[in-house]
Amino acid sequence: MMPTRFFPHLTVFLLSLLALGHSGAVTFPEKPPNEHFYVDQARLLSPDDAATIDKIASSLLAEQDIPILVVTIPSLISFQATDYTVDSYAAALFDEWGIGSQERNYGILLLVSPGDRKARIELGKAWGGKHDADAKHVMDSLIIPVFKRGDFSEGVREGVNALDKMARGLALPKPKAPWWILPAMILGTILVIMVIVSLFKSGRSGWGWALIVGIGVVIFFILRAAASSGGSGDSFGGGSSGGGGASGSW
């Protein structure tokens, strides 16, 4: 029979294990106040972009009863989510907050974790996976390319703007062309004119043929670079995840 004096030590040991397990449990950011639709734990958003996100999300919630929430976290490990992927953490956060409502489960969550170099669009269950392709377009064409340039605030803002269009059933925005496209087109036009003049004057012996090859090489790299950079209710009412979405990394 176990000695009576052993029970206090066993109790202390079990309580210690319980406390240790609790201290390592996954945590979540606190919900934003009613007037805001973002939690910027990673401090990625500029004041202007944060205000734009609030304006877009507030209008969508008031007009369509669809909440969009943005959450940035430094990393998964900062919330003891070492056993989670960004996808599973986004789903768990969505359910923890109850984004949307049980009756109208069309919530949208955009989670960004710069420390993990990953982002996730999580959709409420009522979306039923019907907008996975749209979500992937938003992630791959409009958010991730901007993140790769280091402008997280703009990427989040553009993502929210596109998700608003998706929720309203409107055409999604197209990726913005890089700033150098127009100057490159102007320069290309000038070079083409110069080549034509050279060919007329010198024929095959002129420098125009060499320039044609050079222009072809330049156009190849421009197209390659462009392809790689390329597109009033309550927010929390017991909604749940499971309606699809899209993930991205940079």
Image (cartoon, rainbow, N blue to C red):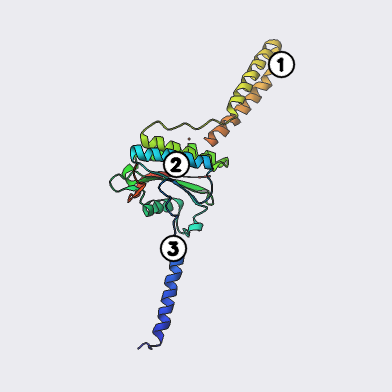
Left or right: residue 101 versus residue 191 is left
Q: Is residue 70 visible?
A: no
The x, y position of residue 46, in whole percent, is 54, 43
Say which residue label 2 marks: 54
| Mark closest to the chain's N terminus, 2 or 1 | 2
Instruction: Identify the residue at image location x=33%, y=42%.
Output: 127
Q: Under tag 2, what secondary structure?
A: helix
Local crowd size for mark 1, using a 10 Å CA cut-off: few (<14), some (14–19), many (≥20): some
Say which residue label 3 marks: 25
The x, y position of residue 234, in whole percent, is 35, 46
Instruction: Identify the residue at image location x=44%, y=72%.
Output: 17
The x, y position of residue 43, in whole percent, is 54, 49
Alpha carbon separation for disc pair 3 and 1: 73 Å
Alpha carbon separation for disc pair 2 and 1: 60 Å
Say which residue label 1 marks: 206
Quadrant for residue 133, please give it. Answer: top left
Of the pair 112 and 34, the residue shown nearer to us: 34
Instruction: Identify the residue at image location x=57%, y=40%.
Output: 149
